[in-house]
Amino acid sequence: MVIRPRCLHAYEKELRKLSFIVVTDTHLGYRNQQHAAMQWEKTAVEVAMADGDLVLHLGDVVDGGREAQYPIYLESRKLIGKPVHEIPGNHDPHELFSKHIRKTIDTAVDHHWLRFLLINNARTDSHDGFLSDQQLAWIDEQCHDAAKRDMFVAICMHVPAHKNLHPDRGWYVKPAEGQTKLYETLTRYKDRVLALLHGHFHNGLRGWDDHGPVHEICFPSVLYNLDRKLEDQNAPGYNPQEFRPGYTLVTIEAGAMTLSYKPVGAVALVSKSCKLPSVGRSTKD
């Protein structure tokens, strides 16, 4: 699938190939059983052998704030042997995430020409997402700085901003909780923001492409995914028919982003290609 860029001036430099791996919703301690920890260990072994310069974990590291599971998660993470960058999910209390994973939760990670903004937009008392004015200002500052440095941006949040109603789950950042201001920022930096990356849904690869050149993607859970028959019900966006527990290999090359869904213990079966936005001087549409 190809997304047409809004910007009128193509980026003239050649960007080096990038690859990274996305995991999410490991939920260690799920149902007070060992299965999730065993699944994460198995996944970590596979991810260690997969092509990818770094790993993004998009939230719900543990299930239900089970603090004893964080050291178990971190022990298996050592098997990966490459940088891993997490964000909290609605099952990760902020104070426990800060204690066990990373003291400063909202942070930026630069990888060659791509800047990942890792943002905590989840709370343990809700499935919806939230962005404070302070966070929104920080996103704007980071995008502005990336533009000055001639970089792209990928925004990583556990809960999607995209409005999704029945037959979807209906979990997102509501307009009064930051969605409107976030989309205003995306419009200002539409020639810089590559994609919004999320976990949370447990629906395999679930995404939308109706906000111009910016893809909004929920990634498959390592632990379990559900088929909600979204494409059969003509739900907006896309939801390829693969729902086994898995992770995603992301490759960006020659202006295209390829997502390869890797079920744990199996070969890749699902790929999705999306044309990225060009970069250049801003002009009116």
Image: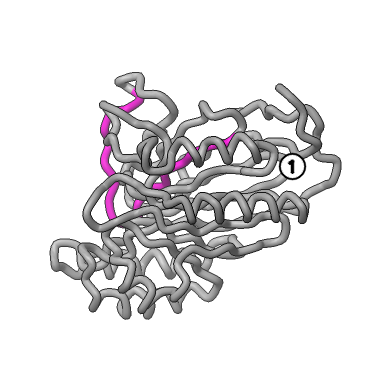
Q: Which residues are magenta?
A: 214-231
Q: Secondary structure at mark 1?
A: loop
How far from the left and from the top, in percent, is residue 152? 68, 49
187 and 231: which is toward the camera: 187
**Quadrant location of the N terminus in the rendered image:** top right
Task: Give the image's coloring scheme.
Answer: one colour
Secondary structure that dominates the magenta span: loop
Residue positioned most to the top:
234
Up/down of 134 relative to 271, above or below: below
Up/down of 172 relative to 29, above or below: above
Q: Look at label 1 and name its amino acid.
A: Ala
How far from the left and from the top, in percent, is residue 169? 27, 36
Which residue is disc 1 drawn over?
Answer: 254
Residue at 43% across, 48% down: 198
Res 274 → quadrant: top right
Residue at 37% across, 80% down: 75
How far from the left and from the top, in percent, is residue 109? 60, 64
| Residue 226 belongs to magenta span | yes
* Left or right relative to 141: residue 120: left
261 and 133: which is toward the camera: 133
Q: Is residue 76 visible?
A: no
Residue at 74% across, 42% down: 254
